[in-house]
Image: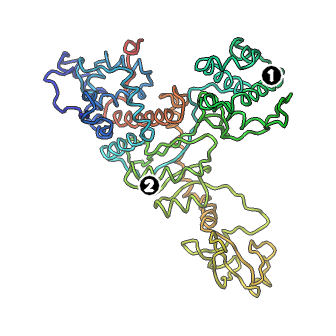
């Protein structure tokens, strides 16, 4: 059954078991501010739906368990280290407002809570609701924010193409031998020897031998697919699904039944299988892994800056598609989208500038590179109305005779008469196109936004305002260097998403507590508390 943490505390808590000097030091530490300010920010009602009245004994204190998950990421601990700190560390007892007798939980409990959070949108609700309360409690201004992405890797080995084939086949054969030993005997003995009985057969290949061994691995993969693709029991295995996926994504099916060689695709898709240990990993220009999107407040009047939005996407996905989801999340955590969002050029496009302004009331401050051809006058030389829907006049001062939408309604057409353009000295470099009824300038609101941004970003005011964007690079570094974001201890999209959100929430909590104390940030857990 669901039970909130009782507000009634024992008469003699951990602080009353200390001599006055130690108690005074404890009350000046991060633990006191966490207990008084941060602990109440955790909303226990998020977990109420998981604990029903007829579901046995009451739950553990949700604030205590969630705090263990947060402090684990604050100090970058393993589960065992965090549980030891909970068991023996007086500062943790005081911070979590528990007595030494209450300060206990097991690894299974941490696992169960992470499972609940993973199934609930990867812990997004916990991050957003706690951050919203933190922002309100600290009176942070969120009208000005910055956005960036950073590359992370889950707990996998970065494999070569040969390594990918070998590991996928080996994983399948090991699962087949365990679950269906008789079926495993149907696999050719030579194949079983290569992947099961002769460990390292492929791993010790020199670079010069790799192509030949890759050809052999591709033949073995083809043979396994042909042998088991119609077998119901094997086809239902997750390991075989990866074998089949690898075959479809990497190999060109041969024409004959017994080919001597399997042709490999020269450039597999960026969404193709990169590791059988984490099938959700994709490949992008930064390498194999995932991309994390981070939005952070950057108002100079704030006592500290809080991360307002965090999202995870594939390494092969462009930042162009992330602006909308991030702004939607900032609306949930901050109550409203920021008035201004500074981002790098990877997020900049005319459509994003228009969408951010019209749908969220946000000015997307991101520079746009120059890609217009030198052959024509830039569209920015034309004068448009404030909405970017009509041309007021061309560079020569001529106004169009009318406007209309194109056939599919995706763009506007400004029509100039033939008489207007006949003697124009810029006609040979004009971006308008000749039609039967005159000359048309095709444009969208995004085109106008791009033209205006290219002019705006050259101004001193824009450059000065944009300087603050680079500050989020320090946040990326902090998350990777101090909190293990760069190389996670988990794999699989749901676990990766939850781990990232807990780490980001931990940074917010750490900053909140640090600005309330005399020390720059919570001190590390003593070594004895991390033993084991």
- Of tags 1 and 2, which is closer to the observer? 1
Residue lying at the far left of the rendered structure = 11
Left or right: 375 with respect to 98?
A: right
Where residue 466 appears, as percent x and y from the top left, is: 54, 52
Where is residue 512 drawn, in percent x and y? 35, 37
Q: Position of residue 421 (x, y in %)?
A: 76, 83
Label 1: few (<14), some (14–19) or many (≥20) C-alpha neighbours in 10 Å: some
Residue 24 visible to the viewer: yes
**Closer to us: 397 or 282:** 282
Above or below 423: residue 232: above
Q: Quadrant of the C terminus?
A: top left
Q: What residue do we see at 63% from left, 56% from top?
A: 368
- Determine the residue located farthest toward the bottom in the rendered image: 419
Above or below residue 318? Residue 79 is above
Q: CA distance from mark 1 to mark 2?
A: 55 Å
**Between 53 and 157, which is closer to the camera in this rendering?**
53
Helix or strand or loop: what does disc 2 sit on? loop
Identify the mark at residue 338; answer none if there is no mark: 2
Residue 377, quarter of picture: bottom right
> Which one is in front, 309 or 65?
65
The residue lying at 55 percent from left, 57 percent from top is: 462
Residue indicated by mark 1:
213
Q: Residue 375 placed where, x, y %?
A: 79, 66
Query: For the residue carrying disc 2, how many other residues have a C-alpha within 10 Å: few (<14), some (14-19), or many (20+)?
Result: many
Rendering quarter of residue 277: top right
Residue 145, above or below 41: below
SS of the residue at dot 1?
A: helix
């Amino acid at each position: 059954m669901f039970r909130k943490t009782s507000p009634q505390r024992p008469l003699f808590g951990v602080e009353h078991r200390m001599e006055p000097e130690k108690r005074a030091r404890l009350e000046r530490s991060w633990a006191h501010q966490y207990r008084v300010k941060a602990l109440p920010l955790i909303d226990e009602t998020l977990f109420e739906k998981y604990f029903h009245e007829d579901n046995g004994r009451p739950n553990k204190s949700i604030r205590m368990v969630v705090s263990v998950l947060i402090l684990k990421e604050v100090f970058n601990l393993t589960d065992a280290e965090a549980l030891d700190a909970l068991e023996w560390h007086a500062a943790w007892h005081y911070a979590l407002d528990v007595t030494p007798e209450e300060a206990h939980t097991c690894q299974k409990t941490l696992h169960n809570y992470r499972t609940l959070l993973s199934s609930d949108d990867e812990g997004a609700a916990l991050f957003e609701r706690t951050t919203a309360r933190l922002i309100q409690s600290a009176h942070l201004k969120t009208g000005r924010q910055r956005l960036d992405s950073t590359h992370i890797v889950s707990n996998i080995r970065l494999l070569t193409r040969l390594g990918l084939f070998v590991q996928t086949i080996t994983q399948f054969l090991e699962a087949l031998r365990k679950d269906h030993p008789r079926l495993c005997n149907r696999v050719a003995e030579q194949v079983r020897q290569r992947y099961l009985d002769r460990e390292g057969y492929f791993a010790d290949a020199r670079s010069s031998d790799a192509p030949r061994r890759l050809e052999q691995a591709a033949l073995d993969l083809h043979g396994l697919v042909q042998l088991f693709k119609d077998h119901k029991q094997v086809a239902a295995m997750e390991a075989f699904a990866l074998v089949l996926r690898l075959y479809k994504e990497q190999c060109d099916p041969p024409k004959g039944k017994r080919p001597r060689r399997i042709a490999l695709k020269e450039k597999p898709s960026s969404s193709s299988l990169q590791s059988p240990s984490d099938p959700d990993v994709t490949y992008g220009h930064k390498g194999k892994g995932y991309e994390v999107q981070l939005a952070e407040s950057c108002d100079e009047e704030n006592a500290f800056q809080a991360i307002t939005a965090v999202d995870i996407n594939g390494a092969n996905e462009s930042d162009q598609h992330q602006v909308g989801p991030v702004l939607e999340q900032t609306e949930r955590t901050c109550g409203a989208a920021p008035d201004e969002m500074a981002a790098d050029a990877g997020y900049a496009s005319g459509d994003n500038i228009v969408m951010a302004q019209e749908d969220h009331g946000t000015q997307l401050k991101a520079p746009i590179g120059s890609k217009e051809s030198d052959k024509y006058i830039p569209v920015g030389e034309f004068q448009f109305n404030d909405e970017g829907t009509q041309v007021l006049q061309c560079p020569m001062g001529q106004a169009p005779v009318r406007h209309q939408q194109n056939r599919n309604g995706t763009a506007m057409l400004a029509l100039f008469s033939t008489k207007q353009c006949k003697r124009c000295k810029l006609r040979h470099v004009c971006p308008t196109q000749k039609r039967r009824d005159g000359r048309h300038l095709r444009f969208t609101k995004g085109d106008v936004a791009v033209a205006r941004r290219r002019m705006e970003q050259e101004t001193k005011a824009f450059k000065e305002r944009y300087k603050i964007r680079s500050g989020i690079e320090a946040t990326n570094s902090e998350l990777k260097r101090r909190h293990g974001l760069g190389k996670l201890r988990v794999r699989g999209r749901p676990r990766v998403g939850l781990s990232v959100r807990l780490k980001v929430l931990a940074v917010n909590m750490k900053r909140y507590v640090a600005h309330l104390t005399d020390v720059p940030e919570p001190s590390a857990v003593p070594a004895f508390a991390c033993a084991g």
